[in-house]
Image: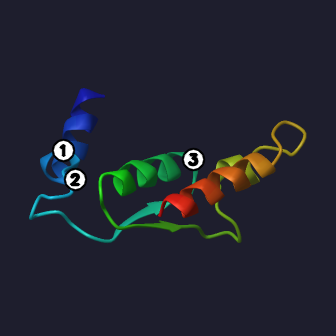
């Protein structure tokens, strides 16, 4: 885990400092639960992030892998709307 954090810090450039000159624009993430969490952290660090999904709606496993009787999809819709508002 520590190795992943240090690699993420290197990837963001200076531990996510948006004023850093070598920062890279246009990061892409899948729109599953982990991708949305990563995209939110990158966006908060000042990076331009784009989510990609091969299906009709974002959410990945939360939307298409978990049946409706176990988790209602309005929770996923609310999370996606929150991320769109932060962008």
Residue 53 percent location from the top left of the image: 58, 67
Q: Which residue is identified by label 3?
A: 33
The structure residue drawn at horizontal position 15% and vertical position 58%, both measured from the top left corner, is 19
Mark 2 residue crowding within 10 angstroms, few (<14) / some (14–19) / many (20+): many
The structure residue drawn at horizontal position 31% and vertical position 62%, both measured from the top left corner, is 47
Residue 86 percent location from the top left of the image: 50, 58
Left-right relation of 57 to 73: left
As drawn, the residue found furthest toward the right would be: 69
As drawn, the residue found furthest toward the left would be: 21
Q: Which residue is identified by label 2?
A: 12
Along the viewing direction, whichever of 26 and 44 lies nearer the viewer: 44
Does residue 3 lie above or below 72 as drawn? above
Badge 2 element: helix
Which one is earlier in the sequence, the residue at label 3 or at label 2?
A: 2
Which numbered dot is residue 15?
A: 1
Badge 3 element: helix
The structure residue drawn at horizontal position 17% and vertical position 63%, both measured from the top left corner, is 23
Left-right relation of 45 to 12: right
Give the quadrant of the N terminus. Answer: top left
As drawn, the residue found furthest toward the top would be: 2
User: Distance between the Cα atoms at labels 1 and 2?
Assistant: 6 Å
Residue 7 percent location from the top left of the image: 21, 43
Does residue 29 lie above or below 14 as drawn? below
Left-right relation of 37 to 48: right
């Amino acid at each position: 885990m520590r190795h992943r954090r240090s690699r993420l810090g290197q990837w963001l450039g200076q531990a996510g400092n948006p004023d850093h000159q070598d920062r890279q624009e246009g990061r892409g993430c899948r729109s599953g639960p982990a991708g949305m969490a990563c995209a939110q952290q990158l966006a908060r660090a000042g990076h331009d992030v784009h989510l990609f999904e091969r299906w009709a709606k974002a959410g990945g496993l939360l939307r298409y892998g978990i049946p409706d009787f176990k988790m209602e999809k309005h929770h996923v819709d609310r999370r996606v709307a929150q991320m769109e508002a932060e962008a």
